[in-house]
Structure formats: C-alpha cells, structure tokens
Amino acid sequence: MYEDIVKEVYNIVYPRRKLFTAGPVACFPEVLEIMKVQMFSHRAEEYKIIHRDTIKRLKSFLEAEKGIVLLFPSSGSGIMEASIRNAVSPGGKVLVTIIGAFGERYAEVVRENGRKAIELSFELGKAVDPDVLDKALRENPDVEAVAITYNETSTGVINPLPELAKIVKDHGKLLFVDAVSAMGGADIKFDEWDIDVVFGSSQKAFGVPPGLAIGAFSERVFELAEKTPEKGWYFNLPLYRKFNEEKDGTPSTPPMPQIFGLNVVLRMIERMGGKEKWLNMYQERAKMVRDGVRDIGLKLLAEPGHESPTITAVFAPEGVKGLDVYNAMRDRGFELAKGYGKIKEKTFRIGHMGYITREDIKEMLENLREVIKELTKK
C-alpha cells in the first residue's frame, strides 16, 4: 500500500559505498535479517529469554563471571556518564588519561557532572606510559577513580590496558574503561584485570546498528552507587541491576532489534570457534590494512606496538588534506572516516570493523593507492 513511500526513503539511505568507517559500521547480514522481526512487548517471556541469553554470552565474552553485565538503551557515552554519576562522590576527583579526543570527552563528562577531572595527557599517536601513570597517582593520592580509553578511535592507538590496570589497582583506585571501539575487537578480561566499569557500543566491532550500550560493573561500583546522591534515574545503576535480576529486562524500553542482532553475533562467534578466532579475524584485518597503507608510502599515526585492531589513523601525504583523501575515496564508492579532533586536517582514518571481507580491503587499498597518486600530482 505504501511501497512508494518506502522507495522514497530507500533512495535516500540505500548503501552507495563500502564502509570503512569509525562507526556506525556495515552490519553483518545475519544481524540485519533478525532485526526485521516484528516487535512485541519487552516484558514478554520471549524477550526475557533473549535478554538472559545475551547477558550470559556477554559475561563469557568479556570474561566477567564476577561482574554485573547490563544493557542500556543509549550510546556508550551514556555509560560514561553513569560511571561518574554513580561511583564518584559529588566534587570527587577522577584522573583521566588522554591520548585523543575521546579521552577529552571523558574529562568533559567528569566536569559536567560536578566532579573534578585531573587530566594526564600524552602526545597524539602515543599510548599511556605506565610509569607516568604511576607517578601521577603518587602525586594525586586523593583521586577516586582512573578513566582510560582502551582504544582511542581518533588516533588508532590501543593502550596497554592489562599493565595500566595493575598500576591503578596497586594504588587502590576504581578503574573505568571506555572500550567503545575496543569491545568486540580487542580482548577484555574483566575479572582478571580487576576492572570496575567497562563499556562498549553496538555499532562498532560487533557490527550491529547503533542504539545499544553494553556495560560490565564490579560489586564495588554498586556499593558506591547505593550511597551516591543525585545519580539520576535513566542511568541509575542499582535500578538497572534490579530490573536485570528481577525482570530480565531494563527500566525503560530496550532497543530490542539491536539486542536480537547482538545475540546473533555472539552466537556467530561461538559457531566460528570462539572469542580467540573472532579476535584473530580483527588482528588479521588490521594488519592487512596497515601493511597496505605502508606499501602505498603513507605513515600511521599510532606508535609501533600500539596500533588499534579496529581502526587505523593515517597521515595524508605532504601538501594533501585528510579531507581530500576522504572525499576522493567517497567518489570512488568507499566511505572511510575523516580525521578527528586536533589532527583532523592532517589525517584520515580507515575503520576495519563490522561486515568487511578481505576482497573489500584489497579493493579499498587499490583505490587508495590510485587516489594518493592523483592527489600528489596536483
């Protein structure tokens, strides 16, 4: 009856390019298929079955058997705010490590929620130096928590989280981990690394549309949250835990299609041989992209040994803007990611998350080689 309306909208949004973005990323076909199912009540038993099963699979994937895993109808930034409002006392201090734009966002969230951010910044392209972190904690013994961006989306740098986590815990501080562009693409051992809060989003390495945030929390966080005043309602962690345990759901309506999609991905991971094989797939993709970029003659922003498994930040050639590369690739049918933050003029980024084949990567690199050749001739 309204097929013409569907066509009108489809003509605006249909996929014209292969996605190598920072997120949202191309979704796995199996995810898109399950998300077509007709909706029903999120209090129905059918939803509860999927909710329970998704939580169970996430606990295994995140190695968080001691942690409390919760689902949120938001982006990852929602849990970023929840970590501060629930577990840091009003006016309390948080040491925020900054290696790019999303570390800066965490510091902003700390300040906007009435707490004090102690910023520990590093040169763009560099990871957090464990010795510098240790020194900063000795100089600021009154901080309540440390915030670390596991994988900095703006620079393509992954932090040495196990080593940093040990330092944080040696000082007896809470550990908050922004794993938005890491979760699903880099290893997370919640229990072993003694993490207090770690969060991710559906639209990154899991290859699911945006709208769902995933968080794992320690018991310590809930002990603090019970005593913390004015933590709000929408991201009230004890309330989420109560609904999760008593109703197999969330306080407000969850993004059911995204949860179905995530459940499918977690089953796919199991079917392909488990977490290790899945993460190896991401490492292989990343190496293929990095090797290809270097072969073209371009330089990476990330320091050696700290290259991200999910996104690669690349310096544009001398005299060429990163946006020029982005636009030229877009004209050829490839959606990369623009440079971000303070280095947006000099860089462009190549995401390797979600539904991407080896053939897609080869084709993208061939076109990138031609684009660089054309742009450097001008």
Image (cartoon, rainbow, N blue to C red):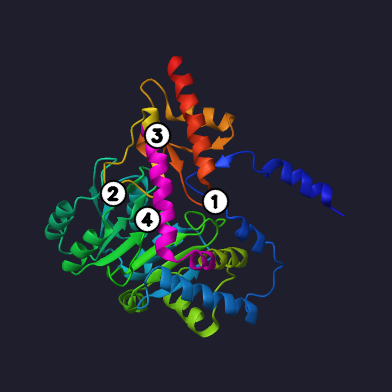
Say whether residue 269 is magenta: yes
The magenta segment is 267-294
**Is residue 143 something one can see in this rendering?**
no
Residue 142: x and y in percent read: 17, 64
Question: What residue did someone put label 4 on?
Answer: 109
Q: Is residue 249 above or below residue 212?
A: below
Q: Nearer the viewer, mark 3 or mark 4?
A: 3
Question: What residue did someone put label 3 on?
Answer: 293
Quadrant of image for the N terminus: bottom right
What amino acid is labelled 1 in the image?
Answer: Tyr
How far apart, in angstroms, are the residues tagged by discs 1 and 2?
30 Å
Near-viewer residue (215 or 85) = 215
How far apart, in angstroms, are the residues tagged by discs 2 and 4?
13 Å
| Dot 4 or dot 1, earlier in sequence | 4
How far apart, in angstroms, are the residues tagged by discs 4 and 1?
31 Å
| Dot 3 or dot 4, earlier in sequence | 4
What residue is at 38 percent from the left and 50 percent from the top? 309
| Dot 1 or dot 3, earlier in sequence | 3
Residue 343: x and y in percent read: 36, 35
Would residue 281 be found to the left or right of residue 219 on screen?
right
What amino acid is labelled 4 in the image?
Answer: Val
Q: Is residue 14 above or below residue 150?
A: above
